[in-house]
Amino acid sequence: MKALVAIKRVLDYNVKARPNDQGDAVELANCKMSMNPFCEIAVEEAIRLKTKGAIDEVIVVSIGSAKCEEQIRSALALGADRGIHVQTDVDLSSLSVAKVLKQVAQNEGADIVLLGKQAIDSDNNQTGQMLAALMDCAQFTFASEVNIDGQNVEVTREVDTGSETLKGQVPVVITTDLRLNKPRFAKLPDIMKAKKKPLEKMTLSEFGVDESSTVSVLEVMAPAKRSAGVKVADVDELINKLKNEAKVIA
Ligand code: AMP
């Protein structure tokens, strides 16, 4: 059994995002970039499944600029076996990413494809769903628990009313939610060892996937500044303010 984990390089979650000078994208120059946090959870889960003996190999794949190698090496340091880097400088749409991932999953004969539920830069929350549709296989989104027994997969997922448990058979696409696990930190010797793990370089042109997107960003702007808060003396004053100043209750 093979697990393919899709990881995306994004602006580090501790960095305050701000628009660039042209106002058409988030400023990334000189900003710390990291693996998308939900992808870290996906890598961690794949490694745990391998440790339990449920899967034999963990392959990570990232699609993006040359610098994505940093995030692939991080995943290898955490315990993934090998990496695939599909290099492109184009900011691909989710559908194009899903089309590339489908081909990688097919080439590798992946039984389980793990993705983050969303990338914190685009907040699209759609690549996993698109991939499952393209692969015509079962999808388990927002996973908070994953159990694998041979070909059988059981996933508990977060839903509005709490959680639900679904069963299916490989091949499957799983997207990770926050509660699934707490990713480990890489140890220094593992960071050194990761430098020698196999990393296959590919180019987008090898996949014949259209780079153009049906979505274009019109404007990127900072959120409006919030006015300072005030302390109220008691509940009556709070209700008065909510009624007469904020006008949010009648
Ligand atoms: P999104 O649908 O854009 O919110 O992304 C959901 C998940 O799709 C991410 O957490 C990744 O697992 C995967 N993904 C999106 N873009 C890429 C990319 N460029 N390379 C690898 N994986 C990606």
Image (cartoon, rainbow, N blue to C red):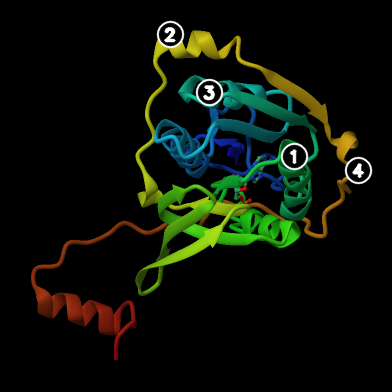
CB of mark 3 near ligand 1 (< 8 Å)? no
Q: Residue furthest front?
A: 150
**Cα distance between the residues tagged 1 and 4:** 12 Å
Q: Give the image location of residue 51, x and y in percent.
A: 41, 31
For residue 142, say whether it is visible: yes
Distance from disc 3 to disc 1, alpha carbons, whole Å, reads: 20 Å
Q: Are marks 3 and 2 in contact (CB under 8 Å)?
A: no
Which badge, 1 or 4, comes first in the chain's sequence?
1
CB within 8 Å, label 3 to label 4: no
Q: Which residue is disc 4 drawn over? A: 208
The mark nearer the N terminus, 3 or 2, is 3
The residue positioned 44% from the left and 52% from the top of the image is 177
> Identity of the amino acid at label 4?
Gly
Please tell me how crowded label 2 is: few (under 14), some (14-19), or many (20+) other residues with Cα within 10 Å: few
Tell me the mark number nearer the camera, choosing from 2 and 1: 1
The disc, 3 or 1, on the residue closer to the chain's N-terminal end is 3
Instruction: Using the image, tell me which numbered label, if any, was put on residue 54.
Output: none
- Residue 104 - label: 1
Would you call the spot at circle 1 few (<14 residues within 10 Å), some (14-19), or many (20 or more)? Answer: some
Sequence-wise, the earlier of marks 3 and 4 is 3
Q: Of 235 and 120, which appears nearest the observer?
A: 120
Disc on res. 74: 3
Residue corresponding to mark 2 = 189
Image marks 2 and 1: residues in contact by CB distance under 8 Å: no
Q: Amino acid at mark 1?
A: Val
Query: How far apart in space, not on screen, are marks 4 and 2 (Cα)?
Result: 39 Å
Residue type at mark 2: give it: Pro
Quadrant in which the C terminus is drawn: bottom left
